[in-house]
Amino acid sequence: MTKWVYSFGDGSADGRADMKNLLGGKGANLAEMASLGLPVPPGLTITTEVCSYYYDNGLKYPDSLEAEVDAAVAAIEASVGAKFGDADNPLLVSVRSGARVSMPGMMDTVLNLGLNDITVEGLAKNSENARFAWDSYRRFIQMYSDVVLGVDHYHFEELIEYHKEDKGVLLDTDLDAEDWKSLATAFKAKTEAELGHPFPQDVREQLWGAIGAVFGSWKIDRARVYRKLNNISDSWGTAVNVQAMVFGNMGDTSATGVAFTRDPSTGENAFYGEYLINAQGEDVVAGIRTPQNLTRRAREAAGSKLPSLEEAMPEVFSELAAVFATLEKHYRDMQDIEFTVQRGKLWMLQTRAGKRTAKAALKIAVEMAADGLIDEKTAVMRVEPAALDQLLHPTLDPEAHRDIFTRGLPASPGAASGAVVFSSEEAEVLAKAGTKVILCREETSPEDIHGMHAAEGILTARGGMTSHAAVVARGMGRPCVSGAGQLRIDAKAGVMTAVGREIKAGDILTLDGSTGDVLVGAVKTIQPELSGDFSKLMTWADQYRTMAVRANAETPEDTSVAREFGAEGIGLCRTEHMFFEGERIIAVRQMILAEDVAGRKSALAKLLPMQRSDFEAIFKIMHGLPVTIRLLDPPLHEFMPREESEFEDVAKAIGINVAVVKRRASDLHEFNPMLGHRGCRLGITYPEIYEMQARAIFEAAIAVEEATGETVVPEIMIPLVATEKELTLLRECVDAVANDVFAETGHHIDFLIGTMIELPRAALRADKIANAADFFSFGTNDLTQTTLGISRDDAARFLDEYVKKDIFAQDPFVSIDQDGVGELMKIGVERGRKTRPDIKLGICGEHGGDPASVEFCHSLGLEYVSCSPFRVPIARLAAAQAALKEG
Amino acid sequence: MTKWVYSFGDGSADGRADMKNLLGGKGANLAEMASLGLPVPPGLTITTEVCSYYYDNGLKYPDSLEAEVDAAVAAIEASVGAKFGDADNPLLVSVRSGARVSMPGMMDTVLNLGLNDITVEGLAKNSENARFAWDSYRRFIQMYSDVVLGVDHYHFEELIEYHKEDKGVLLDTDLDAEDWKSLATAFKAKTEAELGHPFPQDVREQLWGAIGAVFGSWKIDRARVYRKLNNISDSWGTAVNVQAMVFGNMGDTSATGVAFTRDPSTGENAFYGEYLINAQGEDVVAGIRTPQNLTRRAREAAGSKLPSLEEAMPEVFSELAAVFATLEKHYRDMQDIEFTVQRGKLWMLQTRAGKRTAKAALKIAVEMAADGLIDEKTAVMRVEPAALDQLLHPTLDPEAHRDIFTRGLPASPGAASGAVVFSSEEAEVLAKAGTKVILCREETSPEDIHGMHAAEGILTARGGMTSHAAVVARGMGRPCVSGAGQLRIDAKAGVMTAVGREIKAGDILTLDGSTGDVLVGAVKTIQPELSGDFSKLMTWADQYRTMAVRANAETPEDTSVAREFGAEGIGLCRTEHMFFEGERIIAVRQMILAEDVAGRKSALAKLLPMQRSDFEAIFKIMHGLPVTIRLLDPPLHEFMPREESEFEDVAKAIGINVAVVKRRASDLHEFNPMLGHRGCRLGITYPEIYEMQARAIFEAAIAVEEATGETVVPEIMIPLVATEKELTLLRECVDAVANDVFAETGHHIDFLIGTMIELPRAALRADKIANAADFFSFGTNDLTQTTLGISRDDAARFLDEYVKKDIFAQDPFVSIDQDGVGELMKIGVERGRKTRPDIKLGICGEHGGDPASVEFCHSLGLEYVSCSPFRVPIARLAAAQAALKEG
């Protein structure tokens, strides 16, 4: 027969901490604490299965439930030595909901249940405190009427206010027993007036009313919405906890408090918490009275005059300290607890794993591992990878004043201050002159790369979390606020406004890329400390992960950062980023504007030494680690100026007629550049471009091998392949260049040729494509765009709405859409391996730095993920957790 | 033991017509004719297996081949009564290649093989014609040296020219036996000088040299390329035919000719062909002499004075007529034959199914079926569906003079003349005034729909076969030439130029949409005759096909055309096309420019009655046939003007500030509109738009049901769905409108709600999406764009190159990429049916009118294809053939 009710108290319990699904989080932990011999007021837990039964059976309870509850209440009575509903010595209980995971929106708590017109007198007598008894009674009526009977609490607050007015006093503390007694009567009358029947005097009726209210609250709208948003199944149900009351408000030897076993903000191994003397639980958080510190040290640090618990109740404090030690040792994690002291006796009301900052999580995990409380694997699992982002970037001083100019999307974390500039050229000039600048643009394009590099931070009026600005800024580790919709930029006039307020070029702004705030003036920032804890945890993580982590980087700076953050190679070197710098853009444009192959080749000849030296620098920094170089990918028009006014400059620089520039720019125009003449399509139609790039790679690799003696094995990646034939043709082209260079230099190197799988067709035909590929790298950005038919640059218009309406659980450009894009990846992996079992597989989309996506890649058996340098630690940790979860 | 050599002649043969794979087309048909008792010069066929053996075994022949050839040659000798290499009575043979399918680029023919310095004398004696013998010898040396020995033929032509100069004559006919004799000697000397060894005198060496040359030519570059382009496997190999020579040049009782058993141009059941007296085969096609007609009737019709074969050689002619009858009866198809008359005796040298025009194919198929020569199924299989296009549109009079202005892509078939206009407005105004116009645009956009409708034809400077202009023009049945790259249009100046030549607005142009030619002036066109043959064949086709054929249409005109062409419903009614007409665009823009839901609703309220009346018209025309209406699909910016100059007009028309128009237009701008805020994404973010459209559909359906008494079951199609949730939400939205309308009218109708499968994710998650869909319609245009990552509008830049380089066998926007897009369709079908076995499945992309794609859709088990009205007959025929092929 199913057991519907679990008892706990007096050093034993029917349940355990690992029975959260059945008893809810609160009930399971109360049972566990009871079993540990900790002072837990006795109680009972009605299981979540009752909730399911209740809804599956037309809101009826199981037959045997009542008897089980009665028996469990009797056990509480026996333990406490009081009787539920007894006139002389009444047992009072609390009734609380408790689902598997804490769920705001549901009925929370009814306290002091068991009081009625008769038992209140018993309580007054036993407590020797009539005021306390009547205050408790009126609180009960108020709370029960509100949460169980649905009479809004303002009715009662109004009555209290009237009463105080009548009496001519200001504070609740000025009311005495008689006042509360008459208010209790008034409350009952109010409830009866609202409901048409009297407030229940029968304590069993009270109890079952409260139980029913808890179960009922499982299906109210707020709770449903919360579950939907948090992926909590409707079928889980909630448990109900009924527990003997203890009172922190029985005078000055009573108290109530909340505490963490360690500092949840810094992770420091020191008690952290607050308490109030002569108060009930909700008073601590209500903020009416100033809570007091737990420890003397904390009190002194805070400069508070109110005595700490350590000082006010030293015995209770040392008992609490022992409880903390027991709990940490037992749960092997930092605990968030609630306690009450009733007339000098400590009672534990709740314990659970405490929420913490990333910094604290790191410190606690590493210290607990050092203390042997947990092993290294557990320590690795304890830190949320995404939270590392907080640790890797400067943050705004939380104490500093924030004068918010406008808000946008938190597109790239970190904080930075600087003078406002409206163009990339200006950004570069000022930065070279030593001025810190914030680049403010309507939106950015690849032309802005140098300006973004020069700037401390980037602010855009348009574009989402995955707009050009956002992606590039994250890659560079620059803070970025994107899509600040209120912003109106008039770059020509050198001014921007937001809701009427004006900021001029040169004015100082501060960006908080972690919140999306744009602040006026310079706000103090705090530099990250990549402390010993961080590197220790990362070392442990590296031991357990099976996937390698590479970085997407192309500049020497980014490559160095990537190495510092532990990248084990470059997974994506975007050669086109190199095309925008300095003199190069002129040669690039000359190449684009050439009328024939000869003209293109002569322009490409100018680019060759520049590309070669780029690659040499990268190969040197990477010391023989693998470097995947993607050949030119974007459509050529991205390299042309946008404004007609700039055409003249280009024509002059290259020495051709401006009409030619205009015509060519117009010829190059594309309706959907994302699906246009780009990627390997450029290589097919202008093989001389890829030939130049291949030559630069081979010559650089040979030069570095000769200079350093380290082996360089470049991985040449052909983008946007849809068919085997494209790759075959371009492979032949690259091979031919290799043979030429090897013949010219008399030096042979090994190299790989592979492709990105970034089109649905490529994934579907991976079996064929693998014939010509040494490796696949999943380009999940473009694969997401094509599979879902969503342009990353245009998605902002509806993606928010899509996430709000739960069409996508998450932005699919942030976390891989596993059902759609993920299936194509799976198909690509399976079919690629079928043809070539040893094919090297990786991912180089933005998703490579998203923990959920990293876990998915692990499940596909990829060899590596590659992400922006600043996300490398996140990927390392996520990869370790994926491996540990699997193990 | 493998038989390597097959003999034929004297009324019997080792081979048969159905042994084309083994004997090649020519050899198999020669064998068949011999078996039929037709006069075929005896010969032998070396099988294609020898070719394969030859290449698989290091260019060696099978051991037994020589003996088999010897035996077969002996049989020829016996039959002819001459001996190979015999001085007195030499056997001469032809050696011809013959693959399964005719293959230009390979070695074709060596005639007169067996002649040498000795046998030439025997030929002279036996033929009593020394000139003939020496002419034959020199021809042989010339031909053999060229095709077998690789000595270029110009060497020999030069020698003839010198000889004629020396002799002071102009024509070959002025050369006598001695001249040819001395030229034969000079030829041999030339060959020896070029090769370093003498011309072979051993006739066996000659024979094996020729056989080797045929096999060798299988792998020369031209042949390889041709095979690649025509999907002919390298492994098939070629056969070699060795056949006793017969001579059409043995004097005036000899002749040679080519003939078709019916007119290949009109299909008329009358002999059609040409012959020459005293000539060899190549003379007929060489064009040096004017060939003569076969029949008197043809001669008279042509006004020729040269006697027809019927008149010149009546006995031969009647024998030939009997042969034609035998062949047609036997092959049950129109034949293309070659014959030679040697001294009054008819010899058949070749027969094969004759190529024919669409018109002829139709007529021949229908007449042969009427005559009981073939059954209806065969008749249906005999007409190439794509060729029907020729029959459904006006064509240019082939006799008319063509003054070509420029050329573009043959984007939409048919021909039309009219005055040049450069804007859609102008087109509409002039057309209303009764002027026929040709709309000339850089490229067209949805705004141009009304202008395209008003124009007789459309010419664009940009865009491919599947550009907007091309797709819309095909849908409307308007001829269109797109992507005329040389064209420079200056619309403001009212002029366009191509390679320096100028055409002004108002000048008359003629478009040939079937060839891409743009002609100056009005060129006479011929109207199509949808004759009895056409409708008879279509009726037969309809009996055998299992897939329904619908049309993509939205205007009453197009809908009517679709019905005339036999459409069984509308598979795609693009509601947005209705948004551009007349006053509507103002309301549409008002809706787009509205700042809130209320503003949008008030604009939509204006559109409602217009949409309703559109739908009423369509429902009425379709008389209860299914009509699939797609809710709004394109991004809203498509409805905004493109030129800033037009913003003012819009602002005025709607009565708002021009700055608002500008800002909104800029807000709406998209980088990749194809992947942007369109399709169901509009329905999700602006549900009021879909609500209006749904209301218009339901109100129209009810009104038509009430007016006509015919049941209307609208199929409402939600575009661009990627997830089940989108469809669920929009289904709820449409259902709610339905319930409202049913309640308001008291009239209930049945309707379906379905979606397009046009994104890879939709195909992959078809199992989920089917939960909310009554039907799927594969939108293969967008599915191709996303699966391949190719924008249809931008593909022209590289797609040609891609097809040339064999990366795509065909333009994937014309014929479904079965390996990529096709697999997604297959997945979509399987998964959709798994969830909902009775789900209705169709296709509404442009591919619905492509025969290969129709066959593919049949193989997937789709219920219908939908295509532009003018392609409906093609789809009907293709669907029938697909069903018959399967059967």
Image (cartoon, coloured by chain):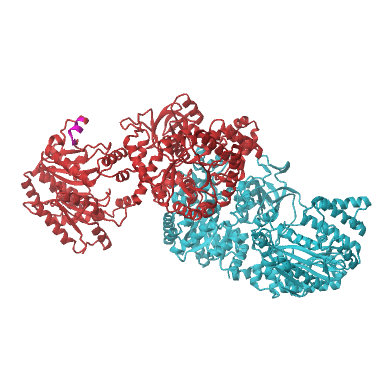
Chain colours: A red, B cyan
Does residue A536 show up? yes
Q: Is residue A766 above or below residue B250?
A: above
Magenta-drawn segment: A292-300
User: Viewed as shown, does residue A559 lie left or right of B532?
Assistant: left
Question: Residue at image x 64%, y 69%?
Answer: B380
Q: Classify residue B150 as left or right of residue A440.
A: right
Residue A714 location (% of width, % of height): 51, 41
- Give the residue at the far top of this rendering: A433
Determine the residue located farthest toward the right in the rendered image. Answer: B168
Image coordinates of residue A197 in percent, x first then y, are 17, 55
Quarter of the image where the N terminus of chain A is located: bottom left
Q: Is residue A388 left or right of residue B3?
A: left
Asked whether, in this view, residue A202 is left or right of residue B844, the answer is left
- Of A250 and B50, nearer the camera is B50
Front one among A329 and B491? A329
Image location (x, y in percent) of residue B591: 49, 47
Q: How many marks?
A: 0
Q: Height in image: B513 above or below A702? A: below
Return the x and y of residue A563 as percentages of the image width and height.
42, 36
Q: Is residue B119 magenta?
A: no
Q: Can residue A409 be seen in this view?
A: no
